[in-house]
Image (cartoon, rainbow, N blue to C red):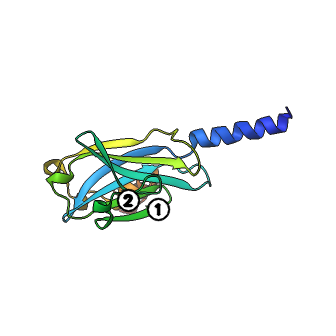
Amino acid sequence: MNPAIGIAVLLAVLQVSRGQKVTSLTACLVNQSLRLDCHHENTTTSPIQYEFSLTREKKKHVLYGTVGVPEHSYRSRTNFTSKYNMKVLYLADFTNKDEGIYTCELRLSGQPQTMPSHSISVLRDKLVKCEGISLLAQNTSWLLLLLLSLSLLQATDFISL
């Protein structure tokens, strides 16, 4: 085998294995809608396939995505947005009947499921309001926040460096 071909195959396999790893899955309430934030690494330029699902009474229900076919009863209730490293699903009119295990699954287009998915148990009574979660803190690195805070504190002569 040509060594260049072997290296190319190895790099392709490594890219697929690192691909898109879900780093966290969080849930909160916006008015009467459930919001699921699926944060992930974005280490490749290959297209990402995704799926949000709900497991209730040992049965998996696909809510939204490009992997499985979403169930008809959820199609009119879902709204989806995507950023560079975050997929967000809204499920309107969230009730106790929608409680269960929610899962975010990612994979590279055309590849079998090789990356672990993340799941979260969602109970309506235990959900926090999304307004209590800072969007700035979710989308900005902690190091940048720290540096900005230090500059602000130094500018107000609260600390001296």
Q: Residue at x 22, y 41 (%)?
A: 57
Dot 2: few (<14), some (14–19), or many (≥20) neighbours within 10 Å?
A: some
Q: Amino acid at mark 2?
A: Val
Q: CA distance from mark 1 to mark 2?
A: 8 Å
Q: Residue at x 35, y 62 (%)?
A: 156
Q: Which residue is mark 1?
A: 83
Provide residue 157's location: percent of width, then percent of height: 36, 59
47 sits to left or right of 156: right
State if disc 2 and disc 1 touch (CB < 8 Å): yes
Q: Which mark is residue 88?
A: 2
Q: Amino acid at mark 1?
A: Lys
- Residue 132 falls in which quadrant of the image? bottom left
Up/down of 56 relative to 140, above or below: above
Furthest residue toward top: 1
Mark with earlier residue (1, 2): 1
- Residue 87 falls in which quadrant of the image? bottom left
Give SS at disc 2.
Answer: strand
